[in-house]
Amino acid sequence: MREVIADSGFSRRFQEFVREVCRWAVTITTNARDGFKVHTRRWVVERTFAWFVRYRRLVVDYEYLPETSEAMIQAAMIHRMLRALHPHG
């Protein structure tokens, strides 16, 4: 991950945390009072979340540690990539 896209409702504290601790770029979208606007890359995020629903352990928050959840997400994405490389196996 290199960039976080957030709306203007997120606090400055969150934005600073993402920039300084995670070292990711932060893009703030326009204010909600301007009306709903679809972000051009939002479908990528929505599609990825839809893929996660196929993995039972990712549907409900079973894990105690966030590191375990992160490992399960990585395992799910590795499985997706392997299936894309060799779909009939």
Image (cartoon, rainbow, N blue to C red):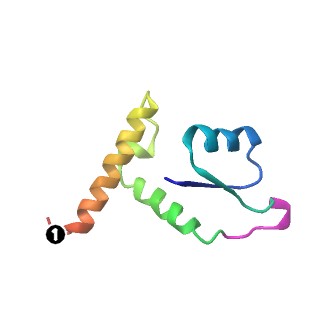
Q: Secondary structure at mark 1?
A: loop
Q: Residues within 10 Å of mark 1 (few under 14, many from 20)?
A: few
Q: Quadrant of residue 13?
A: top right
Residue 22 location, x and y as percent?
55, 41
Nearest to the observer: residue 50 or residue 7:
7
Report the side of 82 relative to 58 (left or right): left
37 magenta-colored: yes
| Residue closest to the far left | 89
Figure check: 37 above or below 70: below
Which residue is label 1 attached to? 88
Magenta stretch encompasses residue 78 = no
Quarter of the image for residue 64 reads: top left
Residue found at x 35% / y 50%: 55
Front residue of this view, candidates 27 and 43: 27
- State the image coordinates of residue 72 (x, y, percent, origin top left): 35, 42
Percent position (x, y) of residue 71?
A: 36, 40
- What's the residue type where badge 1 is placed? His
Answer left or right for 66 relative to 5.
Answer: left
The residues colored magenta run 32-38
